[in-house]
Amino acid sequence: MGQGPSIDKSLLQTFVPVNALSGEHLERLLDQQEVRQYQPGELLFDIGDRDNTTVYLLSGEVELETADGASQRVSAGGVESWHPLDHHQPRRSRARAITAVSVVLFDSFRLDTLLAWDQSVGYVVLDINANAAYEGDREWMIRLLKSPLFYQVPPSNIFEIFRRLKPRKMKTGEVIIRQGDDADCCFIIKDGICEVSVLVSGASEMTPVAMLEAGQWFGEEALLTGAPRNATITMATDGVVMRLDRADFDELLREPAVDSIGAGDALERVSAGARWLDVRTPDEYAQGHLPAALNMPLNVLRLKSRLLDPSRTYVVYCDTGRRSTSAAFLLRHAGIRVHLLEGGLNASPDVLQLGD
């Protein structure tokens, strides 16, 4: 086995469910890729492996063999190669290279997190653009959604952040945070420009190092690490900053409370009349889903949730639980009785059997 070069975005767009990501989130996924090469006869993975990776075939041919001896060959470029190789945890088959093979691997949890973020943010952007109350704030709010910090925030908490931000008018030259101070909040620039400067050890004066514009965060690093402020931020123009207090910041980094249940409990509830609700993409659903599951992908869930029976209970799932957590939160607020399958399909492969 060897390490290989990276791949480009256009190739990612042929893979399921990667092809459901927007261009921006595809770029983030590219930063997380790992390309490996295998020689004929080498194992990519074995039955029982639990590696929590999503593996796509880039070139060559692979044989998948199950414990009962059934085998399948997958060739790069074929329809089967659009889907992950044996997308189960633990692995249900042994994957062996027939020819020289190249694959790309992604962390399954990170991929599902990006899918949840991508599809949830779509709703937020629609709401921002449709709500007249946000007319003067749309530019900085939408830019803020692209901040790397936001990827640490559960998608269900996005609008709650906007609700808790407190505006503060600032004048040119005002210091917002000072290097060395303890951190009790962070800020987002709504309007204006800020200068970042640092006092280097041994120097007598601050050194400017960056300029920040509307929609950018600052001050969050000290909240995350507990360390003192590592820079001084000063208004370079008149403007408005939005303050988020430490208590709100800490709370909003946590997942909202949803009713999660294990696989055994979920099966009992389905037997008693609840219904499985699969929030993965249609292509993922077609590859295998739980018996009689209804497919309602996260990106259309809020629009289609009115089609669900409010008198019925639903058990919502995806692969890892990331997308289904967001879905459970949305459905609960829509008045639907819902339980979250804890850990998703990957958490209980021996209990939950997928069918076509």
Image (tube, rainbow, N blue to C red):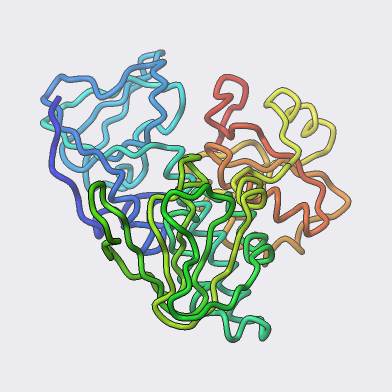
Provide residue 164's location: percent of width, then percent of height: 68, 62
Residue for point 30% across, 22% down:
45
Q: Which residue ends up furthest to the front in the rendered image?
A: 204
Indicate whether 141 appears above or below 287: below
Count of marks overlaid on the render: 0
Taking depth in this image into account, of 186 and 105 the one nearest to the observer is 186
Q: Quadrant of the N terminus?
A: top left
Indicate whether 14 appears above or below 135: above
One can see residue 283 in this view: no
Q: Quadrant of the C terminus?
A: top right
Provide residue 100's location: percent of width, then percent of height: 11, 31
Provide residue 126's location: percent of width, then percent of height: 58, 74
Q: Is residue 36 left or right of residue 65?
A: left
Residue for point 64% across, 63% down:
159
One can see residue 303 in this view: yes
Question: Splitting the image into 4 quarters, where does residue 160 fall?
Answer: bottom right
Q: Is residue 145 left or right of residue 133?
A: left
Taking depth in this image into account, of 289 and 90 the one nearest to the observer is 90
Residue for point 74% across, 54% down:
331
Provide residue 172's location: percent of width, then percent of height: 45, 80
Question: Splitting the image into 4 quarters, where does residue 206 fall?
Answer: bottom left
Q: Is residue 271 left or right of residue 44?
A: right
Residue for point 42% across, 37% down:
108
Question: Splitting the image into 4 quarters, where does residue 138 fall?
Answer: bottom right
